[in-house]
Image (tube, helix red, strand yellow):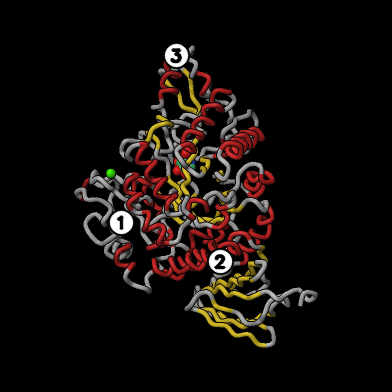
Amino acid sequence: MSPAESDLRSPEWFRSVVFYEVPIRAFYDSNGDGIGDLPGVLAKLDYLSDLGVGAIWLLPFYRSPWNDDGYDISNHYEVDPRFGTIDDLDRLVEGAHARGLRVIGDLVTNHVSIEHPWFQAARKDRASPYRPWFLWSDTGTEFSRARRIFPDFEKSNWTFDPEAGQYYFHRFFATQPDLNHDHPAVEEEMLKFARFWLDHGLDGFRCDAAPYLFKREGTTCQSLPEVHTFFQKVRAMLDAEYPGSILISEANQSVAETVAYFDAGHEFQEVLHFPVMPNFYLALAENNPRRILDVLRTTLSGAPASCGWAYFLRNHDELSLEQVSEDERALFFRYFPLPPEARVHLGVRRRLAPLVAGDDSSVLLLTALVLGLPGCPYLYYGDEIGMGDRLDLPDRDAVRTPMQWENGPTAGFSSADPSRLTRPLVTDPKFAPAARNVAEQETATRSLLWRMRTLLRVRAAHSTVFGSATFEGIDLGSTPVLGFWRRGQEYQILCLYNFSVQPVSGAFPLPERVWASPVELLRGGHSSTVTDHTFQYRLGPRAFSWTLFLCRQPRTAA
Ligand code: NOJ
Ligand code: CA
Protein backbone atom coordinates (compact mmCIF):
# COMPACT_ATOMS: atom_id res chain seq x y z
CA MET A 1 0.00 0.00 0.00
CA SER A 2 1.46 3.40 -0.97
CA PRO A 3 1.59 6.16 1.69
CA ALA A 4 -1.11 7.99 -0.27
CA GLU A 5 -3.35 4.93 -0.10
CA SER A 6 -2.78 4.31 3.60
CA ASP A 7 -3.58 7.96 4.33
CA LEU A 8 -7.00 7.37 2.79
CA ARG A 9 -7.84 5.05 5.67
CA SER A 10 -7.94 7.72 8.36
CA PRO A 11 -11.64 8.05 9.28
CA GLU A 12 -11.30 11.81 9.59
CA TRP A 13 -9.47 12.40 6.31
CA PHE A 14 -12.27 14.69 5.13
CA ARG A 15 -11.48 17.32 7.76
CA SER A 16 -8.12 18.22 6.31
CA VAL A 17 -8.75 18.34 2.58
CA VAL A 18 -10.22 20.72 0.04
CA PHE A 19 -12.96 19.29 -2.20
CA TYR A 20 -13.27 20.10 -5.90
CA GLU A 21 -16.54 19.70 -7.78
CA VAL A 22 -16.15 18.00 -11.16
CA PRO A 23 -19.00 18.05 -13.68
CA ILE A 24 -17.73 15.20 -15.85
CA ARG A 25 -19.67 16.36 -18.88
CA ALA A 26 -17.93 19.73 -18.96
CA PHE A 27 -14.46 18.83 -17.69
CA TYR A 28 -12.44 17.11 -20.41
CA ASP A 29 -13.41 15.05 -23.46
CA SER A 30 -11.00 12.16 -24.03
CA ASN A 31 -12.46 10.67 -27.23
CA GLY A 32 -13.41 13.64 -29.36
CA ASP A 33 -17.20 13.26 -29.28
CA GLY A 34 -17.58 16.71 -27.72
CA ILE A 35 -18.72 15.39 -24.33
CA GLY A 36 -16.54 15.31 -21.24
CA ASP A 37 -16.07 11.80 -19.86
CA LEU A 38 -14.51 9.66 -17.10
CA PRO A 39 -11.21 8.99 -18.93
CA GLY A 40 -11.10 12.77 -19.38
CA VAL A 41 -11.22 13.29 -15.62
CA LEU A 42 -8.52 10.62 -15.22
CA ALA A 43 -6.34 12.51 -17.70
CA LYS A 44 -6.67 15.66 -15.57
CA LEU A 45 -5.97 14.14 -12.15
CA ASP A 46 -2.43 15.48 -12.13
CA TYR A 47 -3.81 18.97 -12.71
CA LEU A 48 -6.14 18.54 -9.73
CA SER A 49 -3.47 17.10 -7.55
CA ASP A 50 -1.07 19.97 -8.46
CA LEU A 51 -3.82 22.43 -7.67
CA GLY A 52 -3.74 21.04 -4.13
CA VAL A 53 -7.22 19.62 -3.71
CA GLY A 54 -7.60 16.42 -1.69
CA ALA A 55 -10.95 15.10 -2.90
CA ILE A 56 -13.06 15.28 -6.01
CA TRP A 57 -16.85 15.25 -6.08
CA LEU A 58 -18.08 13.68 -9.31
CA LEU A 59 -21.51 14.89 -10.38
CA PRO A 60 -23.92 12.03 -11.29
CA PHE A 61 -22.40 9.65 -13.82
CA TYR A 62 -25.24 7.08 -13.83
CA ARG A 63 -27.31 6.34 -16.93
CA SER A 64 -29.69 9.24 -17.48
CA PRO A 65 -31.59 11.05 -20.24
CA TRP A 66 -30.05 14.27 -18.87
CA ASN A 67 -33.28 16.17 -18.37
CA ASP A 68 -31.66 17.38 -15.16
CA ASP A 69 -28.03 16.85 -16.12
CA GLY A 70 -27.83 13.37 -14.58
CA TYR A 71 -29.93 14.04 -11.47
CA ASP A 72 -32.62 12.06 -13.29
CA ILE A 73 -31.29 8.51 -13.13
CA SER A 74 -32.65 5.84 -15.47
CA ASN A 75 -30.30 3.07 -14.31
CA HIS A 76 -28.56 3.26 -10.94
CA TYR A 77 -26.09 0.50 -11.71
CA GLU A 78 -24.68 1.68 -15.04
CA VAL A 79 -22.34 4.43 -16.06
CA ASP A 80 -23.92 6.63 -18.70
CA PRO A 81 -22.32 5.41 -21.95
CA ARG A 82 -21.48 8.98 -22.96
CA PHE A 83 -19.20 9.10 -19.90
CA GLY A 84 -17.56 5.71 -20.54
CA THR A 85 -17.83 2.37 -18.78
CA ILE A 86 -17.72 0.98 -15.28
CA ASP A 87 -14.10 0.02 -15.99
CA ASP A 88 -13.38 3.67 -16.73
CA LEU A 89 -14.88 4.58 -13.37
CA ASP A 90 -12.73 1.95 -11.66
CA ARG A 91 -9.62 3.28 -13.40
CA LEU A 92 -10.48 6.83 -12.38
CA VAL A 93 -10.98 5.87 -8.74
CA GLU A 94 -7.77 3.86 -8.77
CA GLY A 95 -5.85 6.73 -10.37
CA ALA A 96 -7.24 9.18 -7.82
CA HIS A 97 -6.42 6.96 -4.84
CA ALA A 98 -2.90 6.38 -6.13
CA ARG A 99 -2.44 10.16 -6.00
CA GLY A 100 -3.95 10.41 -2.51
CA LEU A 101 -7.17 11.95 -3.83
CA ARG A 102 -10.54 10.77 -2.52
CA VAL A 103 -13.57 10.43 -4.75
CA ILE A 104 -17.12 11.34 -3.74
CA GLY A 105 -20.20 10.51 -5.78
CA ASP A 106 -23.74 11.83 -5.70
CA LEU A 107 -26.41 9.75 -3.96
CA VAL A 108 -29.69 10.75 -5.57
CA THR A 109 -32.43 9.04 -3.58
CA ASN A 110 -35.41 11.39 -3.73
CA HIS A 111 -36.42 10.74 -7.33
CA VAL A 112 -35.59 8.89 -10.54
CA SER A 113 -35.97 9.69 -14.22
CA ILE A 114 -39.40 9.37 -15.76
CA GLU A 115 -37.65 6.98 -18.17
CA HIS A 116 -36.55 4.64 -15.39
CA PRO A 117 -37.94 1.11 -15.93
CA TRP A 118 -39.35 1.24 -12.38
CA PHE A 119 -41.53 4.21 -13.28
CA GLN A 120 -42.35 2.83 -16.71
CA ALA A 121 -43.61 -0.41 -15.12
CA ALA A 122 -45.47 1.52 -12.42
CA ARG A 123 -47.33 3.85 -14.78
CA LYS A 124 -48.46 1.06 -17.11
CA ASP A 125 -49.98 -1.26 -14.56
CA ARG A 126 -51.68 -0.52 -11.23
CA ALA A 127 -50.84 -4.07 -10.13
CA SER A 128 -47.12 -3.68 -10.86
CA PRO A 129 -44.88 -4.26 -7.83
CA TYR A 130 -43.32 -0.90 -8.76
CA ARG A 131 -46.60 1.04 -8.53
CA PRO A 132 -46.18 1.65 -4.78
CA TRP A 133 -42.59 2.80 -5.37
CA PHE A 134 -44.04 6.16 -6.42
CA LEU A 135 -46.64 8.58 -5.02
CA TRP A 136 -49.98 8.63 -6.81
CA SER A 137 -53.12 10.70 -6.43
CA ASP A 138 -56.53 11.00 -8.10
CA THR A 139 -56.71 14.71 -7.42
CA GLY A 140 -53.15 16.03 -7.23
CA THR A 141 -54.06 18.13 -4.21
CA GLU A 142 -52.21 16.36 -1.40
CA PHE A 143 -49.13 17.76 0.35
CA SER A 144 -50.14 21.27 -0.63
CA ARG A 145 -47.71 22.81 1.89
CA ALA A 146 -44.72 21.28 0.07
CA ARG A 147 -42.83 24.14 -1.58
CA ARG A 148 -42.06 23.93 -5.31
CA ILE A 149 -38.30 23.90 -5.80
CA PHE A 150 -38.27 24.93 -9.47
CA PRO A 151 -41.13 27.48 -9.46
CA ASP A 152 -39.92 29.00 -12.74
CA PHE A 153 -40.60 25.72 -14.52
CA GLU A 154 -43.18 23.72 -12.59
CA LYS A 155 -46.60 25.01 -11.60
CA SER A 156 -47.37 22.07 -9.29
CA ASN A 157 -45.63 19.20 -7.51
CA TRP A 158 -48.21 16.87 -9.10
CA THR A 159 -48.46 16.00 -12.79
CA PHE A 160 -51.25 13.97 -14.37
CA ASP A 161 -49.99 10.92 -16.25
CA PRO A 162 -52.56 9.73 -18.80
CA GLU A 163 -50.90 6.34 -19.00
CA ALA A 164 -51.18 5.80 -15.27
CA GLY A 165 -54.59 7.46 -15.05
CA GLN A 166 -53.37 9.30 -11.93
CA TYR A 167 -51.21 12.18 -10.83
CA TYR A 168 -47.66 11.45 -9.66
CA PHE A 169 -45.67 13.56 -7.21
CA HIS A 170 -42.40 15.26 -8.15
CA ARG A 171 -40.55 17.75 -6.00
CA PHE A 172 -38.34 18.84 -8.90
CA PHE A 173 -39.01 18.62 -12.66
CA ALA A 174 -42.01 16.61 -13.88
CA THR A 175 -39.44 14.35 -15.55
CA GLN A 176 -38.26 13.33 -12.03
CA PRO A 177 -40.99 11.35 -10.20
CA ASP A 178 -40.33 11.11 -6.45
CA LEU A 179 -39.78 7.69 -4.94
CA ASN A 180 -42.08 6.58 -2.14
CA HIS A 181 -39.64 6.16 0.75
CA ASP A 182 -42.37 4.68 2.94
CA HIS A 183 -42.17 1.54 0.83
CA PRO A 184 -39.56 -0.76 2.43
CA ALA A 185 -38.32 -2.00 -0.96
CA VAL A 186 -37.34 1.56 -1.92
CA GLU A 187 -35.21 1.96 1.16
CA GLU A 188 -33.53 -1.39 0.51
CA GLU A 189 -32.87 -0.46 -3.09
CA MET A 190 -31.29 2.86 -2.14
CA LEU A 191 -28.93 1.09 0.27
CA LYS A 192 -28.07 -1.33 -2.52
CA PHE A 193 -27.39 1.63 -4.83
CA ALA A 194 -24.97 3.12 -2.26
CA ARG A 195 -23.21 -0.20 -1.64
CA PHE A 196 -22.78 -0.83 -5.35
CA TRP A 197 -20.67 2.29 -5.88
CA LEU A 198 -18.84 2.01 -2.57
CA ASP A 199 -17.81 -1.44 -3.81
CA HIS A 200 -16.35 0.38 -6.82
CA GLY A 201 -14.19 2.39 -4.46
CA LEU A 202 -16.10 5.63 -3.90
CA ASP A 203 -15.19 7.29 -0.61
CA GLY A 204 -18.64 8.63 0.10
CA PHE A 205 -21.57 10.60 -1.23
CA ARG A 206 -23.02 14.03 -1.35
CA CYS A 207 -26.66 13.21 -0.67
CA ASP A 208 -28.87 15.06 -3.09
CA ALA A 209 -32.12 16.74 -2.01
CA ALA A 210 -31.80 15.24 1.48
CA PRO A 211 -34.75 17.03 3.15
CA TYR A 212 -37.44 15.89 0.75
CA LEU A 213 -37.53 12.09 0.91
CA PHE A 214 -40.62 11.73 3.11
CA LYS A 215 -44.01 13.37 2.77
CA ARG A 216 -46.64 13.82 5.48
CA GLU A 217 -49.95 15.61 5.04
CA GLY A 218 -50.18 18.96 6.77
CA THR A 219 -46.39 19.46 6.90
CA THR A 220 -43.93 21.24 4.59
CA CYS A 221 -42.63 17.76 3.71
CA GLN A 222 -39.11 18.90 4.57
CA SER A 223 -36.60 17.47 7.04
CA LEU A 224 -39.20 15.22 8.69
CA PRO A 225 -37.95 12.87 11.44
CA GLU A 226 -38.22 9.97 8.96
CA VAL A 227 -35.60 11.64 6.75
CA HIS A 228 -33.12 11.61 9.61
CA THR A 229 -33.93 8.00 10.46
CA PHE A 230 -33.23 7.03 6.84
CA PHE A 231 -29.85 8.77 6.65
CA GLN A 232 -28.85 7.41 10.07
CA LYS A 233 -29.42 3.97 8.60
CA VAL A 234 -27.28 4.79 5.56
CA ARG A 235 -24.56 6.12 7.87
CA ALA A 236 -24.69 3.03 10.10
CA MET A 237 -24.28 0.88 6.99
CA LEU A 238 -21.27 2.95 5.87
CA ASP A 239 -19.64 2.79 9.30
CA ALA A 240 -20.15 -0.95 9.54
CA GLU A 241 -19.32 -1.98 5.99
CA TYR A 242 -17.23 0.87 4.53
CA PRO A 243 -15.47 2.55 7.46
CA GLY A 244 -13.89 5.87 6.56
CA SER A 245 -16.43 6.68 3.86
CA ILE A 246 -18.52 9.79 4.35
CA LEU A 247 -21.92 11.38 3.81
CA ILE A 248 -22.38 15.04 2.92
CA SER A 249 -25.82 16.56 3.22
CA GLU A 250 -27.36 18.82 0.63
CA ALA A 251 -30.03 20.59 2.65
CA ASN A 252 -30.72 24.15 1.60
CA GLN A 253 -32.69 25.07 4.72
CA SER A 254 -32.83 27.38 7.70
CA VAL A 255 -30.01 27.24 10.25
CA ALA A 256 -31.92 25.04 12.69
CA GLU A 257 -33.04 22.59 10.03
CA THR A 258 -29.59 22.43 8.42
CA VAL A 259 -27.69 21.83 11.66
CA ALA A 260 -29.98 18.89 12.44
CA TYR A 261 -28.31 16.85 9.68
CA PHE A 262 -25.23 16.37 11.86
CA ASP A 263 -27.43 14.70 14.46
CA ALA A 264 -24.70 14.72 17.08
CA GLY A 265 -22.35 12.87 14.75
CA HIS A 266 -24.67 9.98 13.89
CA GLU A 267 -25.84 11.15 10.51
CA PHE A 268 -23.78 13.28 8.11
CA GLN A 269 -20.07 13.94 8.59
CA GLU A 270 -20.38 17.08 6.47
CA VAL A 271 -23.28 19.45 6.01
CA LEU A 272 -23.14 21.99 3.20
CA HIS A 273 -23.36 25.41 4.82
CA PHE A 274 -26.22 26.94 2.81
CA PRO A 275 -27.15 29.48 5.52
CA VAL A 276 -23.76 31.24 5.51
CA MET A 277 -23.13 31.16 1.74
CA PRO A 278 -25.20 34.19 0.61
CA ASN A 279 -23.67 36.17 3.46
CA PHE A 280 -20.23 35.96 1.84
CA TYR A 281 -21.66 37.95 -1.07
CA LEU A 282 -23.78 40.28 1.05
CA ALA A 283 -20.65 41.10 3.02
CA LEU A 284 -19.01 42.26 -0.22
CA ALA A 285 -22.13 44.31 -0.99
CA GLU A 286 -21.91 46.01 2.41
CA ASN A 287 -18.11 46.26 2.42
CA ASN A 288 -18.51 44.78 5.86
CA PRO A 289 -18.17 41.20 7.05
CA ARG A 290 -20.03 41.45 10.35
CA ARG A 291 -22.93 39.32 9.17
CA ILE A 292 -20.59 36.40 8.39
CA LEU A 293 -19.29 36.33 11.94
CA ASP A 294 -22.88 36.51 13.22
CA VAL A 295 -23.89 33.39 11.25
CA LEU A 296 -20.72 31.55 12.23
CA ARG A 297 -21.30 32.37 15.89
CA THR A 298 -24.69 30.69 15.77
CA THR A 299 -23.69 27.70 13.64
CA LEU A 300 -20.11 26.61 14.33
CA SER A 301 -20.94 24.87 17.58
CA GLY A 302 -23.56 22.86 15.67
CA ALA A 303 -20.88 20.70 14.04
CA PRO A 304 -19.75 17.92 16.40
CA ALA A 305 -15.98 17.43 16.76
CA SER A 306 -15.95 14.46 14.38
CA CYS A 307 -17.82 16.39 11.66
CA GLY A 308 -17.36 19.56 9.63
CA TRP A 309 -19.32 22.30 7.92
CA ALA A 310 -18.85 22.22 4.14
CA TYR A 311 -18.31 25.74 2.77
CA PHE A 312 -18.80 26.70 -0.84
CA LEU A 313 -19.05 29.90 -2.83
CA ARG A 314 -20.58 28.49 -6.00
CA ASN A 315 -21.71 25.15 -7.36
CA HIS A 316 -23.42 23.76 -10.45
CA ASP A 317 -26.79 25.21 -9.40
CA GLU A 318 -27.93 28.79 -9.11
CA LEU A 319 -26.49 30.84 -6.26
CA SER A 320 -29.44 30.28 -3.99
CA LEU A 321 -30.92 33.24 -2.13
CA GLU A 322 -33.61 31.15 -0.46
CA GLN A 323 -32.21 31.52 3.04
CA VAL A 324 -32.08 35.33 3.17
CA SER A 325 -34.76 37.97 3.73
CA GLU A 326 -36.37 40.03 0.98
CA ASP A 327 -34.37 43.07 2.09
CA GLU A 328 -31.16 41.11 1.83
CA ARG A 329 -32.14 39.86 -1.60
CA ALA A 330 -32.79 43.46 -2.64
CA LEU A 331 -29.37 44.45 -1.32
CA PHE A 332 -27.77 41.63 -3.32
CA PHE A 333 -29.44 42.76 -6.55
CA ARG A 334 -28.59 46.43 -5.93
CA TYR A 335 -24.92 45.66 -5.47
CA PHE A 336 -24.29 42.99 -8.11
CA PRO A 337 -25.09 44.33 -11.58
CA LEU A 338 -27.11 41.50 -13.09
CA PRO A 339 -29.12 41.34 -16.27
CA PRO A 340 -32.66 40.06 -15.66
CA GLU A 341 -31.90 36.76 -17.39
CA ALA A 342 -29.30 35.97 -14.71
CA ARG A 343 -32.10 35.32 -12.23
CA VAL A 344 -33.58 31.89 -11.83
CA HIS A 345 -35.92 30.61 -9.12
CA LEU A 346 -34.89 32.58 -6.03
CA GLY A 347 -31.28 32.91 -7.08
CA VAL A 348 -28.70 33.76 -9.68
CA ARG A 349 -27.20 31.58 -12.40
CA ARG A 350 -23.88 33.32 -12.55
CA ARG A 351 -20.36 32.20 -11.73
CA LEU A 352 -18.10 33.68 -9.08
CA ALA A 353 -15.73 35.71 -11.31
CA PRO A 354 -18.42 37.52 -13.37
CA LEU A 355 -20.40 38.21 -10.19
CA VAL A 356 -17.51 40.26 -8.86
CA ALA A 357 -16.93 41.84 -12.28
CA GLY A 358 -13.75 39.83 -12.83
CA ASP A 359 -12.01 41.23 -9.75
CA ASP A 360 -9.42 38.60 -8.79
CA SER A 361 -8.92 40.19 -5.38
CA SER A 362 -12.55 39.56 -4.45
CA VAL A 363 -12.37 35.99 -5.78
CA LEU A 364 -9.25 35.35 -3.70
CA LEU A 365 -10.64 37.08 -0.60
CA LEU A 366 -13.72 34.84 -0.54
CA THR A 367 -11.74 31.72 -1.42
CA ALA A 368 -9.20 32.41 1.31
CA LEU A 369 -12.09 32.89 3.70
CA VAL A 370 -13.70 29.50 2.99
CA LEU A 371 -10.23 27.92 3.19
CA GLY A 372 -9.65 29.59 6.55
CA LEU A 373 -12.87 28.48 8.27
CA PRO A 374 -13.09 25.31 10.35
CA GLY A 375 -14.45 22.50 8.19
CA CYS A 376 -14.35 21.39 4.57
CA PRO A 377 -14.04 23.91 1.72
CA TYR A 378 -15.45 23.13 -1.74
CA LEU A 379 -14.24 24.68 -4.99
CA TYR A 380 -16.30 24.72 -8.17
CA TYR A 381 -14.40 23.73 -11.32
CA GLY A 382 -13.08 26.66 -13.30
CA ASP A 383 -13.38 29.16 -10.46
CA GLU A 384 -9.64 28.75 -9.91
CA ILE A 385 -9.04 30.46 -13.27
CA GLY A 386 -11.96 32.90 -12.99
CA MET A 387 -14.13 31.28 -15.65
CA GLY A 388 -17.30 33.02 -16.79
CA ASP A 389 -20.79 31.88 -17.74
CA ARG A 390 -23.27 32.01 -20.62
CA LEU A 391 -26.62 33.47 -19.77
CA ASP A 392 -28.00 32.57 -23.20
CA LEU A 393 -27.93 28.90 -22.21
CA PRO A 394 -31.03 27.52 -20.53
CA ASP A 395 -31.42 27.28 -16.76
CA ARG A 396 -28.26 26.33 -14.85
CA ASP A 397 -26.38 25.26 -17.99
CA ALA A 398 -25.17 28.86 -17.87
CA VAL A 399 -22.57 27.85 -15.26
CA ARG A 400 -21.72 24.42 -16.71
CA THR A 401 -19.74 25.33 -19.85
CA PRO A 402 -16.60 23.42 -20.95
CA MET A 403 -13.53 23.86 -18.79
CA GLN A 404 -11.05 26.29 -20.35
CA TRP A 405 -7.77 24.40 -20.57
CA GLU A 406 -6.17 26.59 -23.22
CA ASN A 407 -6.87 29.28 -25.77
CA GLY A 408 -8.33 27.75 -28.92
CA PRO A 409 -11.54 26.90 -30.74
CA THR A 410 -12.53 24.24 -28.17
CA ALA A 411 -10.54 25.70 -25.27
CA GLY A 412 -8.53 22.47 -25.23
CA PHE A 413 -11.61 20.72 -23.85
CA SER A 414 -12.11 18.41 -26.85
CA SER A 415 -10.73 17.49 -30.25
CA ALA A 416 -14.27 17.63 -31.69
CA ASP A 417 -15.41 20.32 -34.06
CA PRO A 418 -16.33 23.35 -31.89
CA SER A 419 -19.94 23.12 -33.13
CA ARG A 420 -20.22 19.65 -31.56
CA LEU A 421 -19.28 20.54 -27.98
CA THR A 422 -21.79 19.37 -25.39
CA ARG A 423 -22.25 23.03 -24.49
CA PRO A 424 -20.79 26.09 -26.19
CA LEU A 425 -17.82 27.93 -24.72
CA VAL A 426 -17.98 31.19 -22.83
CA THR A 427 -17.83 34.09 -25.31
CA ASP A 428 -17.75 37.19 -23.07
CA PRO A 429 -14.28 38.56 -23.96
CA LYS A 430 -13.45 39.19 -20.30
CA PHE A 431 -13.96 35.52 -19.34
CA ALA A 432 -13.62 33.58 -22.62
CA PRO A 433 -10.79 31.04 -23.19
CA ALA A 434 -8.59 33.71 -24.77
CA ALA A 435 -8.70 35.68 -21.53
CA ARG A 436 -8.89 32.89 -18.96
CA ASN A 437 -7.35 29.47 -19.46
CA VAL A 438 -5.25 27.01 -17.51
CA ALA A 439 -2.27 26.84 -19.91
CA GLU A 440 -1.59 30.58 -19.84
CA GLN A 441 -2.25 31.00 -16.13
CA GLU A 442 0.12 28.14 -15.41
CA THR A 443 3.00 30.15 -16.84
CA ALA A 444 2.21 33.45 -15.11
CA THR A 445 3.03 33.57 -11.43
CA ARG A 446 0.73 36.53 -10.85
CA SER A 447 -2.24 34.70 -12.32
CA LEU A 448 -5.32 33.75 -10.37
CA LEU A 449 -4.48 30.06 -10.78
CA TRP A 450 -1.04 30.49 -9.21
CA ARG A 451 -2.42 32.47 -6.33
CA MET A 452 -5.14 29.88 -5.76
CA ARG A 453 -2.53 27.11 -5.77
CA THR A 454 -0.42 29.01 -3.27
CA LEU A 455 -3.42 29.37 -0.98
CA LEU A 456 -4.26 25.68 -1.27
CA ARG A 457 -0.66 24.67 -0.60
CA VAL A 458 -0.36 26.84 2.46
CA ARG A 459 -3.64 25.46 3.71
CA ALA A 460 -2.49 21.90 3.04
CA ALA A 461 0.73 22.53 4.97
CA HIS A 462 -1.37 23.55 7.99
CA SER A 463 -4.34 21.31 7.29
CA THR A 464 -4.84 20.12 10.86
CA VAL A 465 -5.12 23.65 12.20
CA PHE A 466 -7.31 24.85 9.32
CA GLY A 467 -9.47 21.74 9.27
CA SER A 468 -10.02 21.07 12.93
CA ALA A 469 -8.58 23.66 15.32
CA THR A 470 -10.83 25.91 17.39
CA PHE A 471 -12.20 29.09 15.87
CA GLU A 472 -12.23 32.31 17.82
CA GLY A 473 -13.67 35.46 16.26
CA ILE A 474 -11.91 38.75 17.03
CA ASP A 475 -13.90 41.88 17.83
CA LEU A 476 -12.47 44.50 15.51
CA GLY A 477 -15.10 47.12 16.28
CA SER A 478 -16.52 48.90 13.27
CA THR A 479 -13.67 48.07 10.85
CA PRO A 480 -14.49 46.30 7.58
CA VAL A 481 -12.12 43.49 8.62
CA LEU A 482 -13.13 39.96 9.51
CA GLY A 483 -10.63 38.49 11.94
CA PHE A 484 -10.34 35.19 13.70
CA TRP A 485 -7.87 32.87 15.35
CA ARG A 486 -7.51 29.20 14.50
CA ARG A 487 -6.03 27.78 17.70
CA GLY A 488 -3.92 24.65 17.29
CA GLN A 489 -1.98 22.88 20.04
CA GLU A 490 1.45 24.14 19.05
CA TYR A 491 0.66 27.17 16.99
CA GLN A 492 -2.20 29.43 16.08
CA ILE A 493 -3.08 31.12 12.83
CA LEU A 494 -4.48 34.62 12.75
CA CYS A 495 -6.72 35.20 9.70
CA LEU A 496 -7.68 38.72 8.61
CA TYR A 497 -9.85 39.69 5.64
CA ASN A 498 -10.54 43.23 4.46
CA PHE A 499 -14.00 43.43 2.88
CA SER A 500 -13.60 47.08 1.95
CA VAL A 501 -12.47 48.36 -1.44
CA GLN A 502 -10.32 50.83 0.50
CA PRO A 503 -7.09 49.97 2.31
CA VAL A 504 -7.49 49.65 6.03
CA SER A 505 -5.19 49.62 9.04
CA GLY A 506 -5.77 48.83 12.68
CA ALA A 507 -4.36 47.30 15.82
CA PHE A 508 -5.46 44.94 18.55
CA PRO A 509 -3.80 43.30 21.57
CA LEU A 510 -2.38 39.83 21.05
CA PRO A 511 -3.56 37.13 23.41
CA GLU A 512 -1.14 36.26 26.20
CA ARG A 513 -0.76 32.70 25.01
CA VAL A 514 1.15 33.48 21.80
CA TRP A 515 4.80 34.33 21.22
CA ALA A 516 4.90 37.78 19.74
CA SER A 517 7.15 36.87 16.78
CA PRO A 518 4.77 35.96 14.00
CA VAL A 519 5.45 34.44 10.59
CA GLU A 520 3.43 35.65 7.61
CA LEU A 521 2.18 32.62 5.65
CA LEU A 522 1.21 34.60 2.53
CA ARG A 523 2.80 37.46 0.69
CA GLY A 524 1.33 40.58 -0.85
CA GLY A 525 -1.47 43.00 -0.11
CA HIS A 526 -0.73 43.34 3.60
CA SER A 527 1.87 44.22 6.24
CA SER A 528 2.06 43.95 10.00
CA THR A 529 4.22 44.77 13.01
CA VAL A 530 4.09 43.80 16.66
CA THR A 531 4.89 46.25 19.43
CA ASP A 532 4.13 45.71 23.11
CA HIS A 533 2.11 42.62 22.35
CA THR A 534 -0.10 44.68 20.04
CA PHE A 535 -0.64 43.52 16.48
CA GLN A 536 -0.73 46.36 13.97
CA TYR A 537 -1.85 45.56 10.47
CA ARG A 538 -2.44 47.17 7.13
CA LEU A 539 -4.52 45.42 4.47
CA GLY A 540 -4.93 46.59 0.88
CA PRO A 541 -8.36 46.71 -0.79
CA ARG A 542 -10.01 43.27 -0.44
CA ALA A 543 -6.71 41.84 0.83
CA PHE A 544 -6.20 39.22 3.50
CA SER A 545 -3.44 37.71 5.61
CA TRP A 546 -2.73 34.48 7.43
CA THR A 547 -0.16 34.86 10.23
CA LEU A 548 1.31 32.06 12.30
CA PHE A 549 2.14 32.45 16.00
CA LEU A 550 3.81 29.80 18.11
CA CYS A 551 2.02 29.01 21.35
CA ARG A 552 3.69 29.74 24.65
CA GLN A 553 4.18 26.82 26.98
CA PRO A 554 1.77 26.93 29.93
CA ARG A 555 3.41 28.81 32.85
CA THR A 556 3.81 25.71 34.98
CA ALA A 557 5.69 23.86 32.25
CA ALA A 558 7.90 26.92 31.62
C1 NOJ B 1 -29.87 19.38 -6.30
C2 NOJ B 1 -28.89 19.33 -7.42
O1 NOJ B 1 -27.73 20.04 -7.06
C3 NOJ B 1 -29.58 19.95 -8.63
O2 NOJ B 1 -28.68 20.16 -9.68
C4 NOJ B 1 -30.73 19.07 -9.02
O3 NOJ B 1 -31.46 19.68 -10.06
C5 NOJ B 1 -31.67 18.82 -7.84
N1 NOJ B 1 -30.98 18.54 -6.61
C6 NOJ B 1 -32.59 17.65 -8.12
O4 NOJ B 1 -31.86 16.46 -8.08
CA1 CA C 1 -16.21 12.11 -24.70
Q: Which residue is mark 3?
A: 125
Res 226 → quadrant: top right
Examine the rendered structure and indicate whether residue 91 appears above or below residue 552: above
Q: Amino acid at mark 2?
A: His
Q: Residue 111: x percent and y percent?
A: 48, 32
Q: CA distance from mark 2 to mark 1?
A: 36 Å
Quadrant into which the C terminus falls: bottom right
At 67% from the left and 67% from the top, the residue drawn is: 489
At 56% from the left and 43% from the top, the residue drawn is: 247
Q: Residue furthest front?
A: 1
Crowding at mark 2 (Cα within 10 Å: few <14, some 14-19, many 20+): some
Q: Residue 337: x percent and y percent?
A: 43, 62
Q: CA distance from mark 3 to mark 2?
A: 59 Å
Q: Which residue is mark 2?
A: 462
At 64% from the left and 59% from the top, the residue drawn is: 296
Q: Which residue is mark 1?
A: 426
- Would residue 373 appear left or right of 383 to someone viewing this image? right
Examine the rendered structure and indicate whether residue 391 appears above or below residue 554: above
Among the two numbered marks 2 and 1 on one chain, the one whose residue lies closer to the N terminus? 1
Q: Residue 98: x percent and y percent?
A: 42, 51
At 44% from the left and 35% from the top, the residue drawn is: 173
- Would residue 99 appear left or right of 510 to someone viewing this image? left
Q: Secondary structure at mark 1?
A: loop
Q: Residue furthest right?
A: 556
Q: Secondary structure at mark 3?
A: loop
Q: Amino acid at mark 1?
A: Val
Q: Amino acid at mark 3?
A: Asp
Which residue occupies the foreground of this view, 503 or 120? 120
Q: Secondary structure at mark 2?
A: loop
